[in-house]
C-alpha cells in the first residue's frame, strides 16, 4: 500500500471501481464486468504508469470529485470532460500531479458518457474472484461511490508517461454496430433482419452497464415462436430481443444466461463505442455475413 487514500468529495451520478473484469466465471453465473470502454481504461493506466488491468474509476455523465491524502498522479480519459485541481484547469488525457489535500474535480462529460480516472498505483480495494470490478447485476465488488467514502491507493510500480497525440474517435453522430446474424435469427419473421439493418434506431435513455437498450421498429417473431427458449449462455455483444421486439445489446454486466432469442452478436471491439453513445444517438446495424441474404 502507498498509504494514500482518495476521499470522495462528490460521487457523481454513477461512479464505480472498474478493472479488466473477472473473466472465466460465467459457468457460475458471474458476468465479466469491468470497464465498458476498455481501451480508454487501459490508456488511463498507461499514462500513470500502471499495469493495463489496474483498478480505476468509471464515471457516468457527471464525473466526480476526489481529495487525495497524499500527492498522487492521475489521468482522465474516455469521455471528454473538464478536469480541475482546486478549481484550476488541468489536462485531460495526460498525467496530472494532484497534491495531498487538493480537490481533483472531473466535470460533466462533453463528448461521450463515461470517463476513466486512473491513479498511480491503482485502487487497492479488496478483490472478489480475482477482480476489483463493481458488477451492478450480481452486486459483486465494491459499492458505487458515495460522498464521504475512502478509496485506498496501491504502491506506484511504474513511471507516468505523457502522450504526444491522444485521439478519441469512438463517439459520433451515428453509432454503427456491425453484427453477425444468429444464433437464433430463425426465431424471427421473414424480413426481421431487413428491419434491423434498415430501421431508424436510437439509443434509449434506459441503457445502462447491463445493456444498450434501443428505440425503434420492433422485430416480429416468426409464427409458432411466441414462447421463450430454455435459458442458454449469453456473451457480451449479444443482441437479445425481448417480447416487445426492441433489441438490447449486452454490455459488461450482462446476465450470463437468458431465454429471449438472440438475433445477432456485435463483435466486442465495437462495444466501447456503444458504451460511450448518449441517449438519442442514431444507431445503424450492419450485418457482416449470414448463411442467407440479409437484404
Image: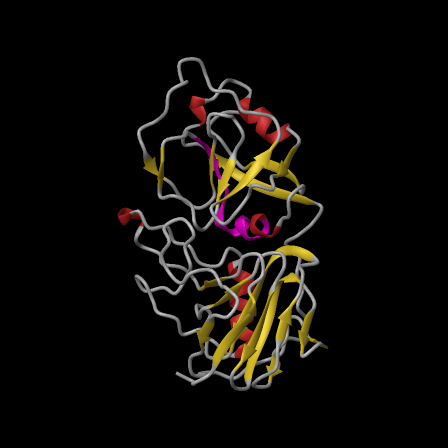
Residue at image position (45%, 69%) is 55
Confirm whether residue 295 shows in the render: no
Residue at image position (51%, 60%) is 38
Quarter of the picture holding the C terminus: top right
Residue 14 sits in quarter: bottom right
Q: Is residue 110 above or below residue 176?
A: below
Residue at the farthest left position: 28
Give how far across and how far down residue 256 sits, in percent. 35, 44
Residue 163 sits in quarter: bottom right
Confirm whether residue 225 shows in the render: yes
Left or right of 91: which side holds 37?
left
Pick the residue in front: 131 or 294: 131
Q: Which residues are magenta?
A: 262-273
**Magenta span contains residue 198:** no
Residue 217 sits in quarter: top right
Quarter of the picture holding the N terminus: bottom left
Residue at the farthest top position: 223
- Name the image colouring: secondary structure
Left or right of 121: which side holds 272?
right
Pick the residue in front: 130 or 177: 130
* Numbered circles on residues, count: 0
Give how far across and how far down residue 107 sits, in percent. 66, 65
Give how far across and how far down residue 158 sits, in percent. 48, 83
Residue at image position (43%, 85%) is 3
Give how far across and how far down residue 52 sits, in percent. 46, 70
Q: Is residue 202 above or below residue 7?
A: above
Amino acid at each position: 500500500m502507498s498509504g494514500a487514500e482518495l476521499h470522495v468529495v462528490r460521487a457523481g451520478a454513477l461512479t464505480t471501481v472498474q478493472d479488466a473484469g473477472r473473466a472465466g466465471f460465467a459457468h457460475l453465473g458471474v458476468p465479466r464486468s469491468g470497464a465498458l470502454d476498455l481501451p480508454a481504461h487501459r490508456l488511463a493506466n498507461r499514462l500513470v504508469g500502471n499495469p493495463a488491468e489496474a483498478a480505476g474509476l468509471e464515471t457516468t455523465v457527471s464525473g466526480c470529485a476526489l481529495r487525495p491524502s497524499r500527492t498522487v498522479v492521475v489521468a482522465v480519459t474516455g469521455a471528454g470532460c473538464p478536469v480541475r485541481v482546486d478549481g484550476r484547469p488541468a489536462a485531460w488525457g495526460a498525467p496530472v500531479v494532484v497534491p495531498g489535500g487538493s480537490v481533483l474535480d472531473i466535470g460533466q462529460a462533453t463528448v461521450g458518457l463515461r470517463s476513466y480516472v486512473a491513479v498511480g498505483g491503482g485502487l487497492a480495494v479488496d478483490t472478489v474472484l480475482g477482480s476489483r470490478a463493481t458488477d451492478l447485476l450480481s452486486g459483486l465488488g465494491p459499492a458505487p461511490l458515495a460522498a464521504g467514502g475512502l478509496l485506498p491507493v496501491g504502491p506506484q510500480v511504474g513511471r507516468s508517461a505523457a502522450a504526444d497525440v491522444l485521439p478519441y474517435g469512438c463517439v459520433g453522430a451515428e453509432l454503427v454496430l456491425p453484427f453477425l446474424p444468429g444464433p437464433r435469427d430463425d426465431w424471427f419473421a421473414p424480413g426481421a433482419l431487413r428491419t434491423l439493418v434498415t430501421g431508424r434506431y436510437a439509443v434509449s435513455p434506459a441503457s445502462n452497464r447491463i445493456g444498450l437498450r434501443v428505440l425503434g421498429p420492433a422485430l416480429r417473431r416468426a409464427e409458432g415462436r411466441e414462447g421463450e427458449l430454455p435459458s442458454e449462455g449469453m456473451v457480451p455483444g449479444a443482441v437479445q430481443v425481448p417480447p416487445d421486439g426492441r433489441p438490447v445489446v449486452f454490455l459488461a454486466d450482462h446476465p450470463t444466461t437468458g431465454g429471449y432469442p438472440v438475433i445477432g452478436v456485435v463483435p466486442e471491439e465495437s462495444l466501447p463505442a456503444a458504451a460511450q453513445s448518449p441517449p438519442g444517438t442514431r444507431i445503424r446495424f450492419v450485418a457482416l455475413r449470414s448463411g442467407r441474404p440479409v437484404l
